[in-house]
Amino acid sequence: MKIAAPIQTNKQIDNHFGHCESYMIYTVSGANEIVEVQNVKSAGGCGCKSDIAQVLASQGVSVMLAGGIGNGAIQVLDHAGIKVIRGCSGDAEEVVKQYIAGSIVDGGVSCQQHDSEHVCSH
């Protein structure tokens, strides 16, 4: 299984999916151990209009552990076969370990801060 997280320079999960500096991809073994970590640079900008969902899906990512993320980005990731877990924060690797252990669940709230001026045409 491969799990991705949008991160800041300090490897903390970024609060805003579309503004992250890069995405860390964690490869998890059948024994639920992280066996590889890869960094994919973000193109920046709107997460729902970028090609990041296709890039991550082509790398085999099936789960995105995100902080704040808008509904448009969630839809694009979902369409690419990537399940989004919202409301994550802290050190990305530690959050991945918590997810693997079953102690992270979807926060249920999408980012609404820019819905009034943000328009996507999908």
Image (cartoon, rainbow, N blue to C red):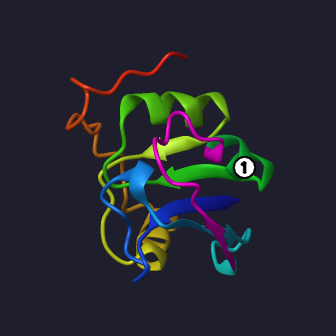
Q: Position of residue 66 (x, y in %)?
A: 41, 54
Residue 101 seen: no
The picture quadrant where one finds residue 117 is top left
Foreground residue among 24 and 34:
24
- Which amino acid type is shown beneath numbered disc 1? Val
Question: Residue shown at 52%/52% (left/top)?
Answer: 64
Q: Give the labeled residue for mark 1.
A: 55
Magenta stretch contains residue 38: yes
Foreground residue among 31 and 28:
28
Eyeballing the image, is 62 above or below 49? below
Residue 19 as seen in the image, left or right of residue 57: left
Magenta stretch contains residue 32: no
Residue 20 as seen in the image, left or right of residue 110: right
The picture quadrant where one finds residue 40 is bottom right
Residue 46 seen: yes
The C terminus lies in quadrant:
top right
Q: Position of residue 9 (x, y in %)?
A: 43, 79
Question: Residue shown at 44%/28% (left/top)?
Answer: 72
Q: Residue furthest top?
A: 121
Question: Residue shown at 33%/53% (left/top)?
Answer: 16
Specify start and end residues of the magenta stretch as a single range: 37-52
Question: Residue shown at 46%/41% (left/top)?
Answer: 46
Eyeballing the image, is 64 above or below 33? above
